[in-house]
Each structure stands twice: as C-alpha cells, then as structure tokens.
Image (cartoon, rainbow, N blue to C red):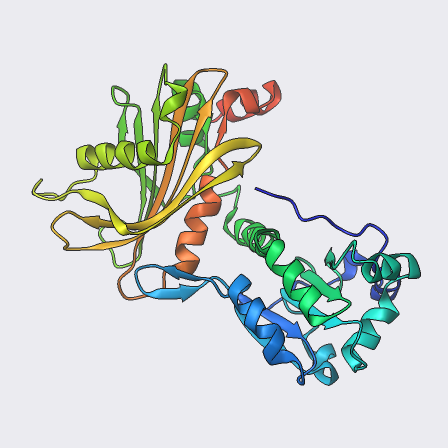
C-alpha cells in the first residue's frame, strides 16, 4: 500500500506550542469521525471532493461509511483539538481565519513548497492528544487542491485508516488475557502465529487440510471468526483475484457448514472489492465483501488477505468474518481486520521471540 509523502519541515511552531507529548491525554471521539476545520463560505466546494475520498460507502450488508466528515468553524477549533481525527483544509488565495492560521504554523520553506505546487499535504500525529491524527491540506487554489487530493486519494484515506487501525489494535491487545498457549501451538505445528484474544475458541484444527478456524461468541447475534488456510508447494500463478474466490469458496464449503450439514458459506459476488496491498511488507491480494449461506439464510461482511510465502513456497489465506444482524458491523469487521494483520510466519520472528512464545506450550 502506498505511503503518503510528508513535508519534513512543517509544524515547527505547533510542536513548540503543544508541550511535552508524554503529558498528552488520549484523544477521544468517534473512531470514524473526521473533524474538518474549513471556512464556511467554501465548505460545499471542499465537501464535494473530500466526501468522495473519505466517506466511501461499504456494504456490511447495510451501507455504512468508512468515515464521516463534520465541519467545525475555526472559532470553535480549540474545543475539538483533542479529537482523534482532525483535517484542516484551505487555499492560499482565500483571506480567512483558516488560511491565516495555517500560514502561521508552517515555516517559510514549507510555505514556498506549497506555493510552488510541490507539496500540499502536512501530516502529524499526537499534536494535541495521544493517538491523534492531524492532516492539513493546502494549495494555491480550489482547483489545484481538488486535483491534488484526487490524485492522492488512496494515500489520504490510508493515512487516516491506518491510524484508526493502530488505535483499534491498541484497544484490542491485552497480553495478560491473550491465548499464548494456542499461539505457541500453531507456531510449533505450522510455523506461524497470530494474535488470539482470550474469548476466541478453537473450532477446527485440521492438519490434513491445513485449516484452523477460531470463533468468538459462536451461535450468538454478535459473532466474529477468523480462519487461516495454507497450501504447500503452491504455484505462484494461484496468487490472483479469481483464485482467491475459488480457494475461499472451496474451503468454506468444506468446513463452514450448518449443524445439519445442509448449507455452507460462500461469497456473495454481488458485493466484492479486490485490491493489491502491502501486508506487513508482503505483496497480497485483499478481498472485502459479503459472505452468505448458500441457502440465503444468513450472511455478513468478510475481509481476506492472500499472499505467497516465497521462502517456504506456501500460499496463505487469512480470513475474517462477522455475523451481527442486530448491530452495525463496520467496527466489528475492523477489529477482525487488524487481528489478521498480526499474522507472522516463523521466518518473520527472531529466535528470542520464538523461544519466548514456545514457553507457553502445554
């Protein structure tokens, strides 16, 4: 996944004025809300392209947005400086409070880069609160800002999304209640590990078919599960979008079935998005969509990563799903997603890390 290019010489005055970062209180507010500081006279123009970038709709199967934009007048900015996600938007050709504020917090060299059109993004973490994201978008004119924002839309969204993922993972992770014995078992038997919360249960561990299924709150109205499947001596040509669908459907038809064995899980192809991503330094195909029982009795959202371990010539499929008919599912699928990203093979661990984990074997 692309990284956002950052100005290295900006926010000097901001850093001086915020004091010691160790004394910052945690940021608060909704995880999916972005507070936008923008002048009211041009907000509608900004919103046209900002909404297309940040308020992308996902199907869970109910339509939900990745983020929600909330514009705040500059006069109220201080009241919102402790929020998780802050976006300041302006253009240099406007004479208003937001423009003057942005000019006051960046140095002359950074301002010259913006005026020359070389830069338009300023980003910083932990400015007024811990685990906070601040992004400033500024260009010479509205049209220039719109063009640059659309050109870098994936990077802009990724910056907020990755920061949100980090916060969610910090809230999820609890080493005291982690199932380290299961992690150790999988590391010894299969050569990989993944973070396992204490309330996840091992539903299936099938060595013959290289399949592990972990479930949280099974048979409830707020169930989450993850499964790991791998294929040894894999053909690199299998790492393609069509194969991902075929492999997932094959393995879920075999293992994710109703208790009476009459129905099984499959992909609902009507709502499917597949992209190429960087998964912890590895090329992977990311699939997001909806699963359903083949008899249409139930369903929900899922996320899936497939990558090839070139050292072992092993194709991995990491998959997470949610069944929560009575609740919004976006935050639940995000929790599953960040859990999948904790997956590591033994080759990605140091000897000390391996030895420390294997001590928990039962």
Q: Residue at x 59, y 79 (%)?
A: 44
The location of residue 209, given as percent across then percent down, is 26, 23
Q: Which residue is drawn at 81% across and 60% down?
A: 114
Residue farthest front in this picture: 143
The location of residue 295, given as percent across then percent down, is 11, 50
Q: Which residue is drawn at 73% across and 57% down?
A: 123
Asked whether the viewer can see residue 362, the reply is no
Q: Residue at x 52, y 65 (%)?
A: 52
Residue farthest right in this picture: 108
Q: Between residues 342 and 354, which one lies in front from this camera angle? A: 342
* Left or right position of 177 against 161: left
* Left or right position of 338 against 70: left
Q: Is residue 277 above or below residue 329?
A: above
Q: In this view, does 316 lie above or below 70?
A: above
Picture quadrant where residue 230 is located:
top left
Picture quadrant where residue 1 is located:
top right
* Left or right position of 16 against 31: right
Q: In this view, does 123 lie above or below 99?
A: above
Image quarter where the C terminus lies is: top left
Q: How many labels does the image show?
A: 0
Q: Between residues 290 and 91, which one lies in front from this camera angle? A: 91
The location of residue 324, given as percent across then percent down, is 29, 59
Asked whether the viewer can see residue 13, the reply is yes
Picture quadrant where residue 150 is located:
bottom right
Q: Between residues 303 and 258, which one lies in front from this camera angle? A: 303
The location of residue 253, given as percent across then percent down, is 18, 36
Q: Between residues 32 and 186, which one lies in front from this camera angle? A: 32
């Amino acid at each position: 996944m692309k990284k956002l290019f950052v100005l290295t010489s900006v926010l000097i005055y901001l850093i001086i004025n915020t004091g010691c970062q160790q004394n910052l209180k945690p940021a608060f507010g909704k995880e999916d809300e972005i507070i936008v500081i923008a002048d009211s006279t041009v907000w509608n123009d900004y919103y046209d392209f900002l909404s297309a970038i940040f308020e992308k709709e996902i199907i869970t199967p109910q339509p939900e947005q990745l983020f929600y934009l909330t514009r705040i007048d500059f006069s109220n900015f201080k009241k919102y400086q402790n929020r998780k996600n802050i976006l300041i938007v302006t253009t240099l050709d406007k004479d208003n409070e937001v423009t003057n504020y942005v000019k006051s917090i960046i140095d002359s060299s950074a301002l010259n880069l913006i005026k020359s059109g070389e830069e338009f993004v300023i980003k910083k973490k932990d400015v007024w609160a811990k685990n906070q994201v601040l992004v400033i978008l500024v260009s010479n004119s509205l049209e220039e800002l719109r063009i640059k924002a659309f050109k870098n839309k994936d990077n802009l969204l990724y910056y907020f999304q990755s920061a949100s993922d980090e916060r969610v993972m910090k809230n999820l992770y609890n080493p005291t209640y982690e199932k380290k014995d299961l992690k150790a078992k999988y590391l010894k038997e299969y050569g990989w590990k993944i973070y396992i919360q204490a309330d996840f249960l091992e539903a299936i561990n099938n060595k013959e078919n290289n399949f592990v299924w972990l479930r949280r709150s099974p048979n409830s109205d707020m169930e989450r599960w993850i499964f790991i499947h791998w294929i040894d001596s894999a053909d690199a040509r299998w790492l393609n979008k069509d194969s991902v669908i075929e492999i997932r459907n094959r393995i879920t038809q075999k293992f994710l079935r109703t208790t009476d064995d009459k129905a099984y899980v499959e992909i609902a192809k009507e709502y499917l998005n597949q992209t190429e991503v960087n998964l912890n330094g590895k090329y992977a195909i990311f699939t997001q969509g909806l699963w359903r029982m083949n008899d249409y009795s139930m369903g929900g959202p899922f996320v899936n990563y497939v990558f090839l371990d070139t050292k072992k010539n092993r194709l991995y499929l990491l998959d997470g799903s949610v069944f929560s008919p009575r609740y919004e599912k976006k935050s639940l699928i995000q929790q599953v997603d960040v859990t999948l990203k904790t997956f590591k093979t033994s080759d990605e661990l140091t000897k000390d890390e391996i030895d420390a984990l294997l001590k928990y074997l039962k």
